[in-house]
Image (cartoon, grey):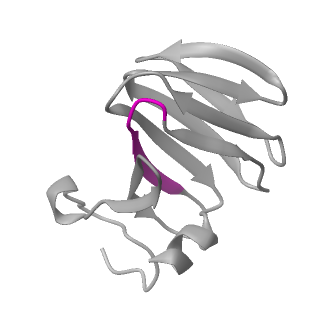
Amino acid sequence: MDNNFGLTGFIFNDDIQWENVGEGVRRKILAYDKDLMLTAVEFKKGAVGYLHKHPHKQVSYIVSGSFEVTINGEKKIQKAGDVYFIPSNIEHGVLALEDQSLLIDVFTPYREDFIKQQ
């Protein structure tokens, strides 16, 4: 679908390349428009999604593996099937506890900083 912005309509995973975004971390931007973004992020064991915050709301679904998730200073272990929600401007990060730990992240609005990196 051509809306002059983003990646919308029918999207096929095999058509999108992984991008390395940190040591042991890679990401695919799967779909987005100005209001919403869906990404997949894969971690090797021991890889870190460093503590950070942003104005976007974020929901993350753990597809596989497990993570130590930190939200606003509180740490919990989460595994495949678990979800965490990050309100705007709340510090958060993850530590992968297994190889091929995979997150699906949803952001609103879209992460303009991710698009600029491509």
What is the residue that sits farthest to the bottom in this orientation?
A: 4
- Which quarter of the picture shows residue 49? top right
Q: Quadrant of the N terminus?
A: bottom left
Pick the front one: 79 or 109: 79
Q: Is residue 6 left or right of residue 34?
A: left
Range of the magenta residues? 37-46
Q: Is residue 103 above or below residue 81?
A: below
Residue at image point 43% right, 86% down: 4
Q: Is residue 74 left or right of residue 60?
A: right
Residue at image point 54% right, 15% down: 78
Q: Is residue 68 above or below residue 115?
A: above
Q: Is residue 101 above or below residue 20?
A: above
Residue at image point 60% right, 51% down: 107
**Percent x, y of residue 38:** 46, 52
- Which quarter of the picture shows residue 104? top left
Q: Is 42 part of what is drawn in magenta?
A: yes
**Percent x, y of residue 23:** 46, 51
Overall secondary structure of the magenta stretch? strand
Q: Is residue 59 above or below residue 74?
A: below
**Percent x, y of residue 36:** 56, 58
Q: Quadrant of the C terminus?
A: bottom left
Residue at image point 54% right, 46% down: 106
Q: Is 81 part of what is drawn in magenta?
A: no
Q: Is residue 35 left or right of residue 14?
A: right
**Percent x, y of residue 26:** 39, 53
